[in-house]
Image (cartoon, rainbow, N blue to C red):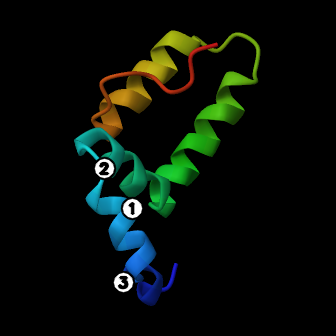
Amino acid sequence: MPTSFWRSPELRDHISRLDRSGFALEFLRRNATYRRDYARLQRWLGRRGVDSAAECAGFARRWGLCFCPCTR
């Protein structure tokens, strides 16, 4: 994502209205490593025999999340 986008008045306006969790979500949503890790988690959860609770807990721990975004 170009840095000019981060400096746009519209985005600044949007971000200034966010609470901490909203800002954290915006940060993670734009983080390529997080997106890759989330995609990997989704692939793992699609397999049979995978302990989804353990995988989700590991994902949440790695990213410092207070919840698991992948409960099924």
Residue for badge 3: 7
Question: Dots 3 and 2: beta carbons under 8 Å?
Answer: no
Give the labeled residue for mark 2. Answer: 18
Judge from the rendering whether residue 67 lies leftward or rightward of residue 1; answer left or right.
left
Q: Are marks 1 and 2 in contact (CB under 8 Å)?
A: yes
How many marks the image carries: the answer is 3
Q: Is residue 56 above or below residue 22?
A: above
Q: Earlier in the sequence, mark 3 or mark 1?
A: 3
| Residue on which disc 1 sits | 14
Q: Position of residue 60 (x, y in %)?
A: 38, 29
SS label for mark 2:
loop
Residue 15: image x %, image y %? 33, 61
The residues tagged by marks 1 and 2 sit, at their Cα atoms, a distance apart of 7 Å
Mark in front: 3 vs 1: 1
Task: Please give the name of the residue rendered at 59% of the width and 34% of the height, measured from the top-left corner.
Answer: 41
Could you tell me if the residues under marks 3 and 1 are in contact, i.e. CB atoms within 8 Å?
A: no
Amino acid at circle 1: His
Q: Which mark is residue 56?
A: none
Residue under the point 63% across and 44% down: 39
- At 58% from the left and 14% from the top, the residue drawn is 52
